[in-house]
Structure formats: structure tokens, C-alpha cells
Amino acid sequence: MFKKVLVAEDLDSISIAVVQVLEELQVPVIHHVKYCDEGLLKVKKALAEKEPYDLMITDLSFKSDHRKVTLNSGDELVEAVNKVQPELKKIVFSIEDKSYRIKTLFNELGINAYVTKGRNSISELRNAIESTFNNEEKVLSSDLSFNFNDKALIEIESYDISILKLLSQGYILESISREFKDSSITPNGTSSIEKRINKLKIYFKANNNVHLIAIAKDFGLV
């Protein structure tokens, strides 16, 4: 089992439960932080002392308070940790259940497991810790039903994000085309862009462009 684990969670009730699971799994060293900045500092300090963590469990959302911070979310913490200790295994434990965001965490930030907070989340977290220790890949809690290989899950690319951002700024089709041409983004024809927008609307089940932008904002895409 893991020997040294860092827990980044700002709610005491949750962190107590997470620590209890780790203690039941007989993890000898468990550290807890309430701020992402503090979590990164602990990772750096442990590396400098040649006693690195071998697992980090983090939430995604952290409530802001009087304290000024550089890292505002678990996403940012994971990204920062990857730069100093990319081999550190990472489990995200969050209420977030949107498939796109979770896929991004796996595919772009390289997390090992994702567990949603809920009725059976503690037992799910225990399973995720054990599975991650056994080097299983892309571990999901059982309430998440999407398939990573499902072709129906459109690959949201930077191209799509660019379209959504311009739409959210009030750009019409012709304006997006001109902007893409000026920025050497391809495909930049109005027909290609319109097809992509329609594909996004189908995937997100949006009734129109306004609805699409509202959904994209909910997903944190724009």
C-alpha cells in the first residue's frame, strides 16, 4: 500500500472521512491541506527532503476566503504538481460529474482515478485507492457510466473551444471565419465552422447557439 499520501480538501468533514479510509488501509504517513498552494509547497518540500509523496487525493473546488492564493482549484493543483513530480499518482474526489471535464482530467492532466462524492463515495474511494496502487488505469467510480472509447463522446478540441469562445463574445459565423483566417486556424470556411457548431449542438443537446453557450459555460469550456 501507499506509504505517504497528501489529501487536499477544504471541508473538514470530507477530509476526516478520507483520512479514515487511508488509516484503515494502513497508510503510515498522511498529510492534509486546505489550500492548493499549500499542497504544492508540501509536494516540493517532500521532494527536496527526498521523501516524496506517492499519492495525492484532491477535490476540484476550493472555496475562496481572505487568504490570497495562486492556485484556485484542484485542476490547477494537479497541473502544477505534474511539473515538479509527474510520476505522482493522483486521485480526484469531487462532486463534479460532467464527462467532458473528467475526460480532460484523465487525458490532459494524467490523473489515475476519479471518484464522485455521493452516497457510496467512501467505499468507492477505497476501491479507487487500491486499484491505483495496483496500477490500474483510468479508474472511475461506479456511478460514472460513460465510456472513454465511446465514439459518441465528441473529442472536444482547442478548435471547438475557439468557436465556443467567439460565439460567447457575440461573433457571427462570418466573423468567426475571418478571425480564424487571420489567425491561420483551419478549417476556416463558414461551411466547416457551421457543421462543427451543429455537431456541438447535437452533442450538448442544445436548442440553439445561445443554449449551446449556456451549456458550454456550465461545463467551464468558456
Image: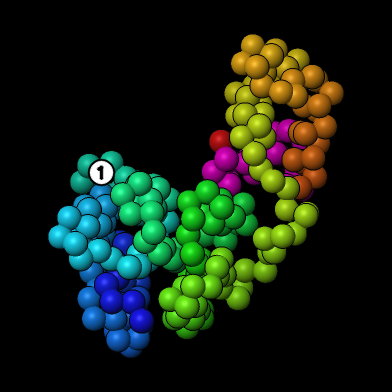
Q: Tag 1, which secondary structure?
A: loop
Residue at the spot 48% in from the left edge and 51% down from the top edge = 109
Vertical comparison of 218 with 209: above or below: below
Asked whether 74 or 110 is in front, the reply is 110
Quarter residue 139 falls in: bottom right
Q: The C terminus lies in which quarter of the figure?
A: top right
Magenta segment range? 204-221
Asked whether 64 or 23 is in front, the reply is 23
Where's residue 211, x and y in %?
Answer: 70, 39
* Dot 1 amino acid type: Val
- Classed neighbour count for the residue bearing mark 1: other residues with Cα under 10 Å, few (<14), some (14–19), many (≥20): few
Can residue 140 be seen at all in this image of the molecule? yes
Q: Is residue 215 magenta?
A: yes
Residue at the spot 64% in from the left edge and 39% down from the top edge = 157
Q: Is residue 141 magenta?
A: no
Image side of residue 32 versus residue 151, left or right: left
Vertical comparison of 185 with 59: above or below: above
Q: Main secondary structure of the magenta part?
A: helix
Residue at the spot 75% in from the left edge and 15% down from the top edge = 174
Image side of residue 150 versus residue 67, left or right: right
Residue at the spot 52% in from the left edge and 59% down from the top edge = 96
Color theme of the render: rainbow
Residue farthest toward the left in the current orientation of the protein = 49
Asked whether 134 or 164 is in front, the reply is 134
Mark 1 — residue? 69
